[in-house]
Amino acid sequence: MRKQTKLVAVLSAAALLAMGASMTSFAAGWEKDDAGVWHYYDSDDEMVTGEWKKDGGKWFYLDDDGNMLTDSWVDDDYYVAEDGHMLTNEWKKTVSDDDQDDPDEDGESWYYFGSKGKKTTSDDKKINGKTYFFDEDGKMQYGWYADSNNNVYYLGEEDDGARTNSSWLWLAAPDSEDDDEKDAADAVSHDSQDDDDPCDEEGWYWFGSDGKMYKDAKQKKINGKYYYFNNHGQMLYEWINGVKANVASNAKLDSDSIEATASEVRYMNVVEEGWRADGWYQIDGADALKAGDDTDWYYFKDGKAKKADDGEKNNTDLTDDGAKVYTKKIKINGKNFCFNEIGQMQTGLQMIDKKFYYFDNDGYMKTGKIANVEEEDDNYTYYFETKNGKNGQGYTGEKSGYLYWNGKRLEADDDYRIYVVGEKYYLVNNKGKLQKSTSKEYDVENFGDDVKFTFRNTYEIASSTKDGSEGTYKNAATLPKIELFDNAIYQDALGVTHYENTDAYEAAQNAVANK
């Protein structure tokens, strides 16, 4: 007699009566053989083969030999666990049914079996709040993935697979030579074997709420901040071409071969951040603007640097190492700063709209008396207007007994010197103090000793007497000049301002002496 060891299913009394008292009956149920394999016998004591049997709310499969299968595929669509129950709403990492007998196949894949036990295939499915993709064989997809519409997703690592949503990821670009990533690489036109392909090997990628990677070559607002992306989907950072973002596909303008104008470049923060810059930054400039070796202060609004126009409007008519100089005074948070045509904040003495201003080492425009203002040849004392209408402009004329031209205090080198400013002639000492004594004899540079003067309107020279005779003081006059960059800005005896060089200034000065 068979020994029944477990899970004996006894027919009901009603069933036995219906079958007749004289009929021989058997109890249908499970039995484990001596080898430890479970079998199922029906009510006729026949071993069940090739069928599913349900027990305790779970299904079990009996193979063609009547053995209960464990840890195995059934019909390539179902899977039974180590205890034999059919997987439902469960994950399993295993080799596919077709590959189990393939000696060359050693890779396992994740499969998901639904509420009826069948594996999920050729679909995306939300499981426990996360979305997963499966191929036609039911293998869970992972890593880079592109659908039939060339939408690109990232599905986590091999043992993850969940679609990335509303997140940033730093990833290696999809590999066009990898069969698992080729579709994604093609979707973003990336050829990893092409040396001229402009995509970075790694970069930041943004995946939206629907999991799609953002890959349009333009800006996008994410969590309240703006970012730029190239055609490959990589976030652009540092200096970029904001007008043609797809051109700057190396993620930053760090190559002399990439062209962009000052109006086109944007600054997008360092690679760890990447959002559109706003406010003050002390950074290296863009190589595309020939400023990559210079660290300067910039002020950005929506990624654009505040700057002077590089047209005639902000042209100073000056040159610096042969290049044109452009400057513009810009008010930021109530304070005035000076910027050049590529957005670098300027300090020191600057000419803006034919007026001279001074900006300290922090970039702030200064007013009033400033000592040690640096020119190309030496340091001088300046005075800048404090009135609102001309605030910050270099003062011209007499101020508190001193003579100024465009802010520069005019001084003698030794004892006394004559200057001509606005067709008027003045006598100053080596501190810039204006003279007005008619009785004193002066030792005057470029003129001689023991010279006496008469004055009109307090300080303007009216006449001079030298050695008892009327002197030609006008020939001894010095033309005021300011040396800035390559230039000498000076005013001739007729009051005309020139923007030339020191050679031109010397020629003009000699003309005065020989007049």
Image: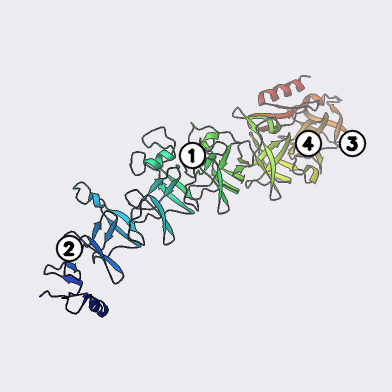
Q: Is residue 266 left or right of residue 193?
A: right
**Mark 2 falls on what kind of element?**
loop
The residues bearing labels 4 and 3 have C-alpha atoms spaced at a distance of 15 Å
Say whether marks 4 and 3 touch (CB < 8 Å): no
Say whether marks 4 and 2 touch (CB < 8 Å): no
Residue visible at 66% across and 26% down in the picture? 502
The residues bearing labels 4 and 1 have C-alpha atoms spaced at a distance of 68 Å
Mark found first going from the N terminus, 4 or 2: 2
Q: Is residue 85 left or right of residue 261?
A: left
* Circle on res. 428: 4
In this rendered view, identify the residue nearer to me: 178 or 114. 114
Residue 251 place in picture, x, y as percent: 48, 41
Residue type at the position of mark 3: Asn
Residue type at the position of mark 4: Val
Residue placed under numbered mark 3 in the picture: 457
Q: Is residue 27 left or right of residue 255?
A: left
Residue visible at 24% across and 79% down in the picture? 17
Q: Quadrant of residue 343?
A: top right
Circle 2 or circle 1, nearest the eye: 2
**Mark 3 falls on what kind of element?**
loop
Q: Quadrant of residue 489?
A: top right
Circle 4 or circle 3, nearest the eye: 3
Say whether marks 4 and 1 touch (CB < 8 Å): no
Residue 472 place in picture, x, y as percent: 82, 24
Is residue 282 placed above or below 31 in the rendered structure?
above
**Mark 4 falls on what kind of element?**
strand
